[in-house]
């Protein structure tokens, strides 16, 4: 479209010093965030470098960084993935309950109750898992190893204290539940009202409305939210450090007392007593954790953002 | 020919199948679901009280029985579609109740274990020279407050300015990148933030350094993205007409932001900042590796180890003395203090947003 009037006297707005300072400061703050994120990677690499170049004998364990990190990485992945398997269906169900099933008047309060789960500090989950949950799982673990022992996950022998990978997984699941729920709820809340009402008007039951209108709309959010939860579970530290009884080694056995530790928990347990090259090794393992969580989070955000662009709701 | 709008007995007409398809469907009586639930719940409580079954078994069994009962009944009377609907309703409700169990259990556990030492001595003594009984977390509470305050002092200006940049100035690739990486930064594990602070200060002060300010830096890394996100949401809610009115009066952009936009969004921003504080005040892992622990008062964040509530609770729990009970009591009392602080902060945040929210709606 051609301009209807050209602007002969387009006066340039005077650039005031206040404006310049303010826009400079706010841009600077934004750039600072990028710098910090880059700095996290840079400083971790710098501090991890000595352990990567050091001879293998000097690394704790005596066989190099890769051998040191691998069981930890395994423990991290197995705990986080199983926690996700428990938490994500539950989270979707809870989001559905709060959005569609609960009485309208108390829906907000119920959502707030779930959010409170996220507010509890992780150390308290650790203490709770150690004191309450671990003893509770001893009986079921015995039963599992007796009756389902042929599945490698429940091979046993069951731990007498209950400080097993299973308990760590349950605690992690509880901790990531509210994070996933919050994102999924947000997606359900943005489901186009007209789609919901149209399917109800055509005689769909509430579940059919959810299956045909809400779930397709929220699908990528559910995937993204689960990955966010995965990222959180991968990096969770104190709860695992307190709950898990660690003896190294790589095993799928969830209910024995010999469990692989996780990267984060191992750092928390070893760091205060370490010095020299051991600290560098721990930082190297932290670098691995950072890389994994960064990748998971970036993928999650990409999935969630894609929904925003193509949803048609906004 | 006029079509009869009413017939003598509409009931009988409705029940006659129209070419084989019935026009009505059966329906469960009103209140069938809650009543069934009540009956099953009573039975479960009965089994728990009188047959001496465990609570968990009764709850799980009750939920299963209720789901099965309502599904079968509805399937017989109402058909498979309605039955599926009722089945999903039951499952979803159970999932919600299941999620509340840990919350209730955590609160009950912390309360019952923490009240033993929740006394004035706990809030007025440090752990200096304490071996067995007594002692308190005064030094840890002060340490937590100082470090969190420092973290807030760092995060709020950075977070606010970044949000202002994203909403008021940011266009193009840089803004997109910042939005994306702020989101990504929300997911940084807290222990990695701690390692970052350690690595940063170790490069300057040499390895093995422990200072309160390091903890504050680590917490800021966790806090900034939360502040940015919530502030950004709030600034976006400020109606554009307010900005345009201000520009029309020839008010410069920065004065518009500070005098019009920020005051309008203030309540929302305060809510976001409070929630961000609540999120980091309970962090343990980053403080464990950057600030360490000490048993005496140290309120100078630039000089050596400090005690913080969460780390205090951790060490009292994992390294109890002999007999261990005194130490464990202190750990639980610290946990109780922590949970109360977090809950109060959450409550304050909700209050602020409830009291002032309508103003921000355009």
Image: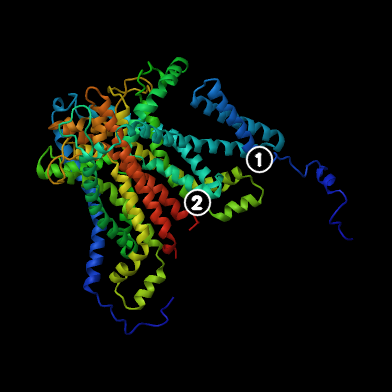
Image quarter (top left, top right, bottom left or bottom right) of the C terminus of chain B: bottom left
Residue A237 drawn above or below residue B356: above
Residue B112 position by quadrant: top left
Where is residue A11? Give x, y as percent.
29, 81
| Disc 1 target residue | B31
Q: Nearer the viewer, residue A182 or A309?
A: A182
Residue drawn at (31%, 69%), measured in percent from left and top?
A: B259
User: Element type at marker 1?
Assistant: loop
Residue B263 position by quadrant: bottom left
Residue drawn at (86%, 52%), measured in percent from left and top?
A: B7
**Horizontal side of residue B190 vs B305, given as left or right:** right
Q: Label 1: chain? A: B
Residue A18 drawn above or below residue A202: below
User: Element type at marker 2?
Assistant: helix
Q: CA distance from mark 2 to mark 1?
A: 28 Å
| Label 2 vs label 1, nearer the camera | 1
Residue drawn at (37%, 65%), measured in percent from left and top?
A: B264
Residue A123 drawn above or below residue A259: below
Where is residue B283? Give x, y as percent.
28, 41
Asked whether residue A74 appears in the rendered view, the answer is no
Q: Nearer the viewer, residue B275 or B88?
A: B275
**Horizontal side of residue B78 vs A67, given as left or right:** right
Where is residue A63? Give x, y as percent.
19, 24
Q: Label 2: chain? A: A
| Disc 2 target residue | A189
| Residues tagged 2 and 1 counted as in contact (Cβ below 8 A) | no
Image quarter (top left, top right, bottom left or bottom right) of the N terminus of chain B: bottom right
């Amino acid at each position: 479209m051609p301009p209807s009037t050209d602007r002969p006297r387009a006066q340039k707005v005077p650039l005031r010093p206040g404006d310049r300072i303010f826009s400079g400061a706010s841009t600077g703050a934004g750039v600072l965030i990028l710098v910090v994120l880059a700095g996290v990677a840079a400083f971790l690499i710098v501090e991890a470098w000595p352990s990567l170049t050091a001879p293998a004998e000097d690394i704790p364990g005596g066989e190099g960084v890769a051998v040191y990190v691998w069981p930890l990485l395994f423990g991290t992945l197995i705990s986080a993935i199983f926690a996700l398997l428990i938490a994500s269906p539950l989270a979707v169900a809870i989001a559905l309950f709060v959005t569609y099933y609960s009485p309208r008047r108390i829906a907000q309060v119920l959502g707030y109750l779930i959010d409170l789960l996220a507010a509890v500090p992780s150390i308290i989950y650790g203490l709770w898992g150690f004191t309450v949950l671990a003893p509770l799982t001893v009986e079921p673990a015995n039963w599992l190893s007796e009756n389902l022992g042929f599945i490698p996950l429940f091979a046993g022998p069951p731990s007498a204290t209950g400080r097993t990978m299973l308990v760590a997984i349950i605690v992690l699941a509880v901790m990531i539940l509210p994070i996933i729920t919050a994102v999924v709820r947000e997606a359900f809340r943005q489901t186009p009202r007209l789609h919901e009402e149209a399917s109800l008007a055509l005689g769909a039951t509430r579940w059919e409305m959810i299956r045909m209108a809400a779930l397709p709309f929220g699908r990528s959010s559910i995937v993204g939210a689960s990955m966010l939860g995965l990222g959180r579970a991968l990096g969770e530290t104190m709860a695992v450090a307190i709950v898990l009884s660690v003896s190294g080694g790589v095993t799928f056995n969830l209910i024995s007392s010999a469990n692989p530790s996780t990267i984060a928990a191992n750092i928390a347990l070893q760091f205060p007593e370490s010095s020299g090259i051991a600290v560098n090794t721990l930082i190297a393992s932290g670098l691995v954790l950072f890389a994994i969580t960064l990748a998971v989070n970036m993928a999650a955000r990409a999935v969630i953002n894609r929904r925003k662009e193509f949803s048609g709701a906004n | 020919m006029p079509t009869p709008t009413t017939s003598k007995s509409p009931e009988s007409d409705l029940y006659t199948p129209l070419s084989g398809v019935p026009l009505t469907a059966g329906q469960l009586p009103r209140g069938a679901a809650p009543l069934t639930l009540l009956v099953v719940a009573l039975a479960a409580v009965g089994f728990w009280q009188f047959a001496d079954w465990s609570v968990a078994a009764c709850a799980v069994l009750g939920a299963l029985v209720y789901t099965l009962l309502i599904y079968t009944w509805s399937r017989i009377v109402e058909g498979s579609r309605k039955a599926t609907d009722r089945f999903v309703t039951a499952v979803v409700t159970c999932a919600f109740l299941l999620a509340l169990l840990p919350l209730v259990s955590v609160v009950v556990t912390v309360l019952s274990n923490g009240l033993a030492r929740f006394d004035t001595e706990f809030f007025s003594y440090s752990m200096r020279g304490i071996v067995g009984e007594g002692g308190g977390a005064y030094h840890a509470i002060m340490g937590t407050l100082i470090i969190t305050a420092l973290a807030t002092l760092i995060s709020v200006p950075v977070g606010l300015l970044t949000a202002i940049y994203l909403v008021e100035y940011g266009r193009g690739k840089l803004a997109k990148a910042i939005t994306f990486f702020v989101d990504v930064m929300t997911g940084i594990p807290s222990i990695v933030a701690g390692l970052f602070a350690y690595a940063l200060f170790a490069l300057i002060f040499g390895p093995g350094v422990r200072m309160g300010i390091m903890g504050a830096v680590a917490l800021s890394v966790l806090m900034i993205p939360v502040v940015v996100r919530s502030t950004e949401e709030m600034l976006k809610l400020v109606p554009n007409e307010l900005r345009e009115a201000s520009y029309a009066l020839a008010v410069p952009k920065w004065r518009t932001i500070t005098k019009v936009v920020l005051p309008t969004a203030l309540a929302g921003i305060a809510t976001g900042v409070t929630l961000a504080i609540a999120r980091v005040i309970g962090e343990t892992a980053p403080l464990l590796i950057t600030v360490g622990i000490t048993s005496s008062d140290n309120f100078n964040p630039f000089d050596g180890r400090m005690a913080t509530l969460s780390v205090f609770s951790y060490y009292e729990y994992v390294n109890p003395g002999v007999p261990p009970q005194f130490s464990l009591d202190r750990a639980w009392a610290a946990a109780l203090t922590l949970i109360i602080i977090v809950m109060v902060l959450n409550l304050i945040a909700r209050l602020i947003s409830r009291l002032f929210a309508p103003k921000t709606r355009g």
